[in-house]
Image (cartoon, rainbow, N blue to C red):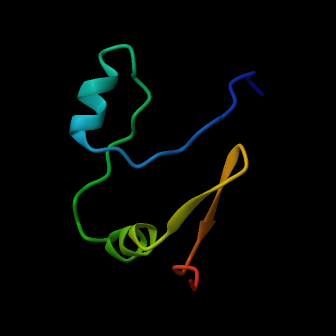
């Protein structure tokens, strides 16, 4: 087993990759076949709010 560890996984656009520059070489392209539409919709619905020095993610908007 190698010493290489995954430290992050992200969904990036081509624009994101362009901003990262040529030094970022470990992207795995995903075909635009709508397979991830449900996942992306759910991710778009996550609400993030500050919590001390960190943040908390909630599936629903907290009641006021």
Q: Position of residue 54 (x, y in %)?
A: 68, 47
Q: Name which quarter of the figure residue 64 lies in.
A: bottom right
Query: What residue do we see at 25% from left, 71% from top?
Result: 34
Query: What residue do we see at 40% from left, 21% from top?
Result: 24
Q: Name which quarter of the figure residue 5 lies in.
A: top right
Q: Nearer the viewer, residue 40 or 31?
A: 40
Classify residue 55 as left or right of residue 35. right
Q: Position of residue 57 (x, y in %)?
A: 60, 64
Which image quarter holds the N terminus? top right
Farthest top residue in view: 23
Q: Nearer the viewer, residue 5 or 18?
A: 18
Query: What residue do we see at 30% from left, 18% from top?
Result: 21
Farthest front residue in view: 64
Farthest bottom residue in view: 63
Q: Is residue 36 above or below residue 23?
A: below
Q: Name which quarter of the figure residue 22 lies in.
A: top left
Q: Is residue 6 above or below residue 58?
A: above
Q: Position of residue 41 (x, y in %)?
A: 36, 74
Query: What residue do we see at 56% from left, 77% from top?
Result: 59
Q: Is residue 2 above or below residue 61?
A: above
Q: How many marks?
A: 0
Classify residue 56 as left or right of residue 49. right
Classify residue 54 as left or right of residue 47. right
């Amino acid at each position: 087993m190698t010493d290489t560890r995954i430290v992050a996984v992200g969904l990036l656009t081509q624009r994101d990759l362009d901003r990262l520059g040529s030094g970022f070489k470990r992207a795995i392209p995903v075909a635009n076949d709508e397979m991830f539409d449900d996942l992306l919709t759910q991710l778009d619905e996550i609400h993030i709010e500050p919590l001390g020095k960190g943040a908390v993610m909630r599936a629903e908007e907290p009641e006021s």
